[in-house]
């Protein structure tokens, strides 16, 4: 679950969200949103998954037999696959940048030419498509080997590595002259920056980062044993996810400030700004900056894979459980579907840029549709199901693992699951609808 949570959301999205929405003030709202909103949704998904030992479709069908609720479960699975499609495009960019760092291309042609490389790369038709294909193939390969021998093994080996790598990059970043301004930006809150928008973005970030609302956590939880402490694994996952986001923030921002760049550089932050920094630092110490560049893009690539496998697994487990398909066949089928949608997303930065639906490119549409609507809808569904379709005794049974341990803050948790989370989610949903 930590592997699913830790990904592009932490290294790519978190730093630029912080940069665009007010630094430390945003971080505080993000932490509060994680504790009081995301964690209850996470627990709802965990409870539904472990109680039924089924994915979203089967879980809802089992809890509400004979109703059509299960089709809402199916919708969450489809949402996970839409996310996989465009996530794999960004994963593909990280494949390309990893190769670029290995072949030392940032140090060629002068630092000032580096940021423009990104725009010209993503607008090409073929190269990003090839990278998207490679990334999705890697994802499919890991998922094909199964939950234990593929997903769990890969995540267990790579997660500690990711933490080590990000700390190495952080140390490098902090050693750069002028980095202290970046630290100040991350720790000194300016509360005047907090607006309704900041709150909405912080919640959205927290949601995305914990992989909520699309049945992924529910699917992973269907494999948790009856004796496992759900609250502990929820808090553990949220803490590692927030911890990793903070480490990534402290690895990226000081370098950005050291290079004299504005923090609100947006989504291009890690693909334009950081290679520029590596190239600039490379003029003084070529070996160190080349090594750090390689480690940095490796970290991005691997963390993206630990997440993409969780999205694919959400669909694969549905086809296995409900349609009786073999794992490799299910993987193959979903590979074809997500590859196709992903290819359209990839081309929407170049040849298909003019294809606009509701004023968005295909990539933006997939991103907005899932982040603003489908994920919130799914989050609502799961809290309602866990909070209201299960009895209080069922909830106590799950949160205490059948009486094995005392459930921590039980009354507060149930209150958050039943009332606060659904009300807040519906408010976000309606706000997004009007915006
Ligand atoms: N949480 C992942 C990240 O931060 C992304 C992710 C994985 C995800 N699975 C998901 C997002 C399911 C939404 C839904 O990069």
Image (cartoon, grey):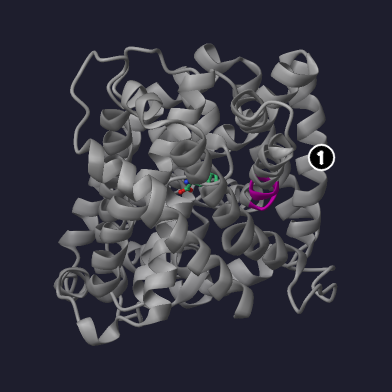
Q: Nearer the viewer, residue 294 or 58?
A: 58
Vertical position of residue 62 compared to residue 185: above or below = above
**Whole-percent x and y of residue 129?**
76, 50
* Quarter-of-image position of residue 64: top right
**Whole-percent x and y of residue 223?**
49, 17
Residue at 71% in and 44% down: 75
SS assignment at label 1 = helix
**Whole-percent x and y of residue 63?**
59, 27
Vertical position of residue 48 compared to residue 44: above or below = above
Q: Is residue 279 visible?
A: no
Q: Magenta segment range?
A: 82-86
Indicate yes or no whether the magenta region holds residue 105.
Answer: no
Q: Is residue 321 visible?
A: yes
Decide if residue 392 is on the left or right side of residue 178: right
Looking at the rendered image, the quarter that the N terminus falls into is: top left
Residue at 63% in and 55% down: 374
**Whole-percent x and y of residue 181?**
18, 76
Decide if residue 62 is on the left or right side of residue 251: right
């Amino acid at each position: 679950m930590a592997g699913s949570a830790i990904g592009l959301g932490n290294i790519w999205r978190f730093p630029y969200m912080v940069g665009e929405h007010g630094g430390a003030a945003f971080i505080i709202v993000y932490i509060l949103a994680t504790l009081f909103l995301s964690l209850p949704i996470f627990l709802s998904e965990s409870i539904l998954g472990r109680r039924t030992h089924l994915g979203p479709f089967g879980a809802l069908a089992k809890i509400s037999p004979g109703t059509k609720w299960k089709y809402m479960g199916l919708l969450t699975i489809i949402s996970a696959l839409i996310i996989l499609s465009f996530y794999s495009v960004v994963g593909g960019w990280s494949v390309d940048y990893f190769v670029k760092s290995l072949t030392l291309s940032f140090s060629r042609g002068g630092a000032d030419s580096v940021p423009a490389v990104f725009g010209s790369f993503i607008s090409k038709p073929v190269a990003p498509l090839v990278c998207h294909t490679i990334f999705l193939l890697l994802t499919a390969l890991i998922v094909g080997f199964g939950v234990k021998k593929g997903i769990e093994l890969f995540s267990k080996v790579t997660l500690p590595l990711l933490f080590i790598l990000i700390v190495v990059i952080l140390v490098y970043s902090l050693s750069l002259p002028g980095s202290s301004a970046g630290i100040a930006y991350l720790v000194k809150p300016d509360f005047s920056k907090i607006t309704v928008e900041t709150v909405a973005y912080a919640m959205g970030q927290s949601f995305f980062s914990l992989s909520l609302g699309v049945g992924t956590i529910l699917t992973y939880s269907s494999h948790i044993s009856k004796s496992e402490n759900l609250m502990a694994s929820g808090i553990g996952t949220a803490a590692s996810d927030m911890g990793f986001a903070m480490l990534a923030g402290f690895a990226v921002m000081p370098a950005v400030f050291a290079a004299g760049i504005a923090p609100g550089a947006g989504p291009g932050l890690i693909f334009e700004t950081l290679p520029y920094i590596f190239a600039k630092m490379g003029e003084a110490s070529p070996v160190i900056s080349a090594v750090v560049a390689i480690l940095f893009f490796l970290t991005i690539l691997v963390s993206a894979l630990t997440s993409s496998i969780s999205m694919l697994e959400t669909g694969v487990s549905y086809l296995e459980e409900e349609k009786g398909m073999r794992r490799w066949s299910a993987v193959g089928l979903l590979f074809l579907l997500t590859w196709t949608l992903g290819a359209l997303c990839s081309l929407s930065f170049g040849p298909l840029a003019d294809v606009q639906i509701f004023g968005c490119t295909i990539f933006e549409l997939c991103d907005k549709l899932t982040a603003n609507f489908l994920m919130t809808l799914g989050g609502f569904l799961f809290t309602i199901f866990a909070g209201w379709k299960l009895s209080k005794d069922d909830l106590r049974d799950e949160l205490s693992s059948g009486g094995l341990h005392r459930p921590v803050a039980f009354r507060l948790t149930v209150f958050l699951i039943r009332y606060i989370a659904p009300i807040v989610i519906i408010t976000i949903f309606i706000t997004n609808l009007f915006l």
